[in-house]
Amino acid sequence: MVTGTLLEEEVRRLAGSVPDPELPVLTLEELGVLRGVEVLAPGKVTVRLTPTYTGCPAIEAMSTDIEQVLHEHGIPEVSVVTVLAPAWSTDDISAEGRRKLAEFGIAPPRPHDAAGSSGGPVPLTLSVRCPHCGSTDTELLSRFSSTACKALRRCVSCREPFDHFKEL
């Protein structure tokens, strides 16, 4: 158990290591919903979270899980605050988070700025790559999957169904 005051970096590391309740393959840091932490006094911290969309039912579970992890590490007073601005975007998912989604069988979202900051060419395809075989020949089966932030797709090449984390 950690005693005394933790530095903000350590509190952020602990809070950020909490798995997302709907996508446990990702941590809250990798998902990009952890917006910041502040150590207010010894044993007293505030953690700021942004939901993936307004009304996301997982935000309550995220808050409870963060509180539990920080309590287990010797922080008795934890406040988790929901922050709606700036709004969360799928661009907030880290490169490691995108890699983990694909490895888990979920097609990661395409970045909004697919050309990058270099102003390079814009891709001409809107296809979603199959996380199983890599084919871009995929089809939409349902706009919603197990969660509102994912769609259900099928690969025409390998015929495997898969979730696609929708771009927001």
Image (cartoon, rainbow, N blue to C red):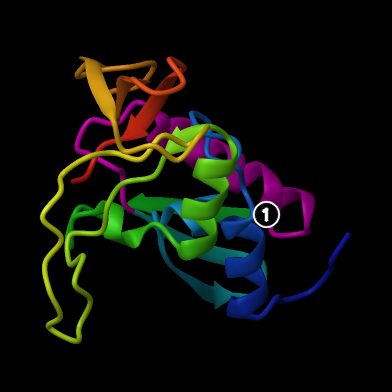
**Mark 1 lies on residue:** 70
**Residue at 39% in and 26% down:** 163
**Residue at 84% in and 66% down:** 2
| Membership of 121 in magenta stretch | no
Segment tinted magenta in the rendering: 50-75
Q: Residue 42: x and y, percent?
A: 66, 74
Query: Can you say whether 132 is above or below 42 in the image?
Result: above
| Left or right: 60 in relation to 118 | right
- Residue 129 image-quadrant placement: top left
Q: Residue 51: x and y, percent?
A: 31, 44
| Left or right: 130 in relation to 115 | right
Q: Is residue 26 visible?
A: no
Nearer the observer, 45 or 56: 56
Nearer the observer, 53 or 140: 140
Q: Residue 137: x and y, percent?
A: 29, 31
| Membership of 66 in magenta stretch | yes
| Left or right: 124 in relation to 50 | left
Q: Label 1 amino acid? A: Leu
